[in-house]
Image (cartoon, rainbow, N blue to C red):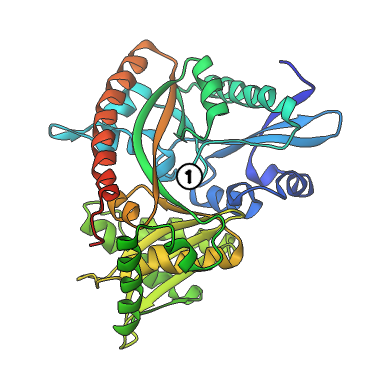
Amino acid sequence: MDGPWRLSGLKVNEVDEPAWERFASGAELEFSLDYLRYADAAGQGDRVLVTAWDDRSHRIVGAMPVTRVSRASFWLSRPAAVLGGQVADGSATLESAYEDALYPAVSVRNICDASPLITAPGRERAAILSALVDQVIAQAKDWGMRSVTFLPVSAEDAALRTVLERRGFAAATYTADAFIDLRGAKTVDDYLGTLSRRRRGNARNEISRFRRDGFSVAEADIDALPVIVAQEADTWARHGDPIGFDRLWQLRAPLAQHLAGRRRLLVCTDSADQVVACAIHLIGRDRYHCFTYGVSYPARQGVYANLTFYEPAAYAIAHGQSRLMLGDTTLHAKALRGAAIRPLQAYTLAFHADGTAFYRDLGERLGDQVRKEIGAAAEATLGKSIR
């Protein structure tokens, strides 16, 4: 390996805290020890931090979180669930077929990308990135895995894409997400000013009608977490995913515990002070993540938009976050309110020929599906009104 770097794999509880704090002091939320401890607790110890140490300075200069995929892992870190679970295949989903072809597996994922954190000078960054990827591959083989998957990877991750492609990873476009760029905005009106005249008027009407109808959004304390999780579980069930309160609680309770000060528990109430919608949002250095959403049905008009776009935009602008991360659902509604839509890819290296063939075929099916979804969202650019 080129360079004076020593590669190692550490469990979160093995990390030297002062060394890590020096390394990640300027990083996004997902590389904070708070987030890493939350992810480790929620995933029941399924993560290893592949790190690169500079033997000259005795400092960490690069890190990549690797998930040894299990049923306890985050849904978004389980490639079979994320990729195979999206397409129906007759009477069964492709999820089990994916597991047959490519599991056991490891995955690399942060909140909304798969990029490592590298703090070395620019001339060394490419070599450290290559060393980290090679170490992940080697670790996966040592564990007896059948595949490695990085997800999601966007066009913004050009350096990572290049390294993965050179090592034979195959790319599959499997979804798209949305974000609003708030750079330069000092108020919500500045953000709304980036919209077309018609959409700007619709958005302002949405905000004023929400207030006139007696709705309001407020931060809640930890006592509200059961209500927030219950509404989220009900909303998932209504959209065909009966994940259930107990499983969601296993994910959200450690989040609330470990990320106090880095998360917001939000409740939307009506004029009778009844909770009609809830959300959990995460606060990064530059990114504000609209992480969860739950609503009581029938959903009230304007509640989703105010809880997902306008209130978060106001908070993010006031607290220095310049990108509002909105996730990969309801893309059309997000595009109407000024969000950019970006395709996301999963890069997978299969260690056996049958896995390679399966992934190639799945990637073609997913790509067709995502192109249709992006095309539907793109209709928002044709002057459609907010609904």
Q: Secondary structure at mark 1?
A: loop
So how many labels did they put on this image?
Answer: 1
x and y percentages locating residue 32 in the rendered image? 64, 51
Q: Is residue 146 visible?
A: no
Q: Nearer the viewer, residue 14 or 340?
A: 340
Seen in the picture, residue 357 relative to 119 is either above or below; the reply is: above
Q: Position of residue 210 (x, y in %)?
A: 32, 77
Asked if residue 87 is positioned above or below residue 349 in the image, the reply reads below
| Up-down relation of residue 175 to residue 286 (above or below) | above
Depth check, front residue: 345 or 256: 345
Q: Alpha-carbon neighbours of circle 1 within 10 Å: few (<14), some, or many (≥20)? A: some
What residue does disc 1 label? Answer: 112
Residue type at the position of mark 1: Cys
- Left or right of 29 in this view: 223: left
In percent of width and height, residue 1 lies at 71, 15
Q: Nearer the viewer, residue 117 or 250?
A: 117
Task: Say whether residue 268 is visible.
Answer: yes
Indicate the quadrant where residue 65 lies.
top right
The quadrant in which residue 172 appears is top left
On screen, residue 359 versus residue 132, left or right, reads: left
**Direction from residue 345 to residue 11 in the image, left or right:** right
The extreme bottom residue here reads: 272
In the rendered view, tell whether residue 301 sits above or below residue 77. Answer: below
Residue 267: give x, y in percent of width and height.
40, 74
Give the quarter of the figure containing the C terminus: bottom left
Q: Residue at x 56, y 21 (%)?
A: 163
Most extreme residue toward the left, as rendered?
Answer: 90
